[in-house]
Amino acid sequence: MNEFQIKPAIQFGANALNKLSALPGQRALIITDQAMVKFGIADMVSQHLQANQMVVELFADVTPDPDLSVIASGMKAFVAAQPDVVIAVGGGSVIDAAKGVIYTLSQGGQLAHKPYFVAIPTTSGTGSEVTAFSVIKSNTEKWVVVDEYMLPDLAILDPALVKSVPAAITADTGMDVLCHALEAYVSNQASDFSDALAEKAVQLVFSHLLDCYRQGHDLQAREKMHNASCIAGMAFTNASLGITHSLAHALGGKFGVPHGRANALLMSRVVAFNADFTGSCNTDAAKKYTRLAALLGLPAADCREGVHSLLVAIDVLREQLGLAANIQACGIAECDFNAAMAAMVTLAEQDNCTPTSPRSASAIELETLYRQSFVSASLT
């Protein structure tokens, strides 16, 4: 018997932030970062809550790739505030940190009741507002925690909050959306339900990401990409991901490569590996990639043509977004990369995303994918 989780409730579109004025509860803790304070977004959220007669406290010390010290500080802020509502406002790091705080408090027996949890993403990438996943850093390693307890109760998708996201971040996070959809689509836990979401997310990315990158204030494009991020998140929280993410988590932990960019640098190589593109090109993943190519209106008369078309589309999009052509172009010296290789491969093997890969990868195959991507992210 299989299960498909549909949670949280989603408020989306123009003025979606107004939903905050009708939240249940009396005490709220906003978890965010200094950027959201600087740009006035944290204050905007606070004003909506105060209009609802809530007492509002602020924890704004989340950093990119939050580590255990951030979680510990957030726990102290939570205990001091005693909120019945928690609102995470920011990118994936902020939402992941809020999840980590709530989850760790529950595991330690410090929560009598789970607070009403609201996630408000300000980037269109991670889909963390609708997933049971949280990525937390410990030293130079990124650990993926998966637990349904961390699912928010409400996700608010307001395109006004992403219209000023810089082009470079739009590119990184947009490729993360694409990777989420592609990996969920061919996961060994995929279903008709997750497939429908993944297909829609891929179509939205190829239709709207470039417009967001080139014309950031195009609110229609921003809304479509914001929706795509959430839809892809719904797909992968149910179907999970694959080794692109496993490899990217290790690479990002060791060398600080932004997560979406790391995925973009590894994605084509993993798609080709999953499809056995240099071999029979007749795997289940190859057949699904071919269906995607056809949905995108690309040549797909057979699996080899369909996979090739999808690879070309990914590579062209990455180039149009101005992303690096290989891992080395991120400023990583080959000697440092080689020195970290064994540790990165081990981390990728142990990653929670690896078991749902459609094709098992040995340590040697994971290393080969790293080395190929170090030289060129493109196969075409």
Image: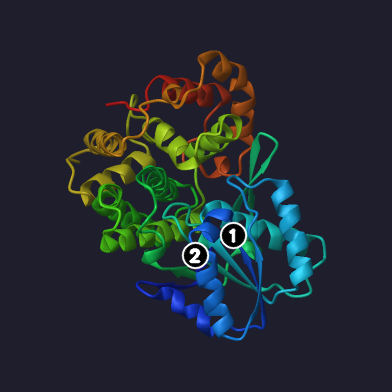
Find the distance from the CA under tag 1 to the CA under tag 2. 10 Å
Give the mark, 1 or 2, whose residue is nearer the N terminus. Answer: 1
Q: Secondary structure at mark 1?
A: loop
Q: Determine if residue 270 is in view.
A: no
User: In this figure, which residue is indicated by the disc labeled 1?
Assistant: 32
Q: Residues within 10 Å of mark 1 (few under 14, many from 20)?
A: many
Q: Nearer the viewer, residue 209 or 250?
A: 209
Q: Residues within 10 Å of mark 2 (few under 14, many from 20)?
A: some
The reply, left or right, for residue 366 in relation to residue 377 is: right
Q: Which residue of the protein is positioned furthest toward the right in this rendering?
A: 109
Q: Position of residue 301 (x, y in %)?
A: 17, 40
Q: Nearer the viewer, residue 39 or 196?
A: 39
Q: Secondary structure at mark 2?
A: helix
Which numbered circle lies on residue 124?
none
Q: Nearer the viewer, residue 328 or 148?
A: 328
Give the residue type at disc 2: Ile
Which numbered circle lies on residue 41?
2
Q: Residue at x 75, y 73 (%)?
A: 82
Q: Residue at x 64, y 47 (%)?
A: 66
Q: Residue at x 74, y 71 (%)?
A: 81
Vertical order, 21 against 327 (above or below):
below
Quarter of the rendering containing residue 282: top left
Could you tell me if the residues under marks 1 and 2 are in contact, i.e. CB atoms within 8 Å? Answer: yes
Q: Position of residue 15 (x, y in %)?
A: 38, 75
Q: Mark 1 vs mark 2: give the one in front.
A: 2
Q: Position of residue 167 (x, y in %)?
A: 35, 45
Q: Determine if residue 19 is in view.
A: yes
Give the residue type at disc 1: Thr
Q: Position of residue 244 (x, y in %)?
A: 47, 37
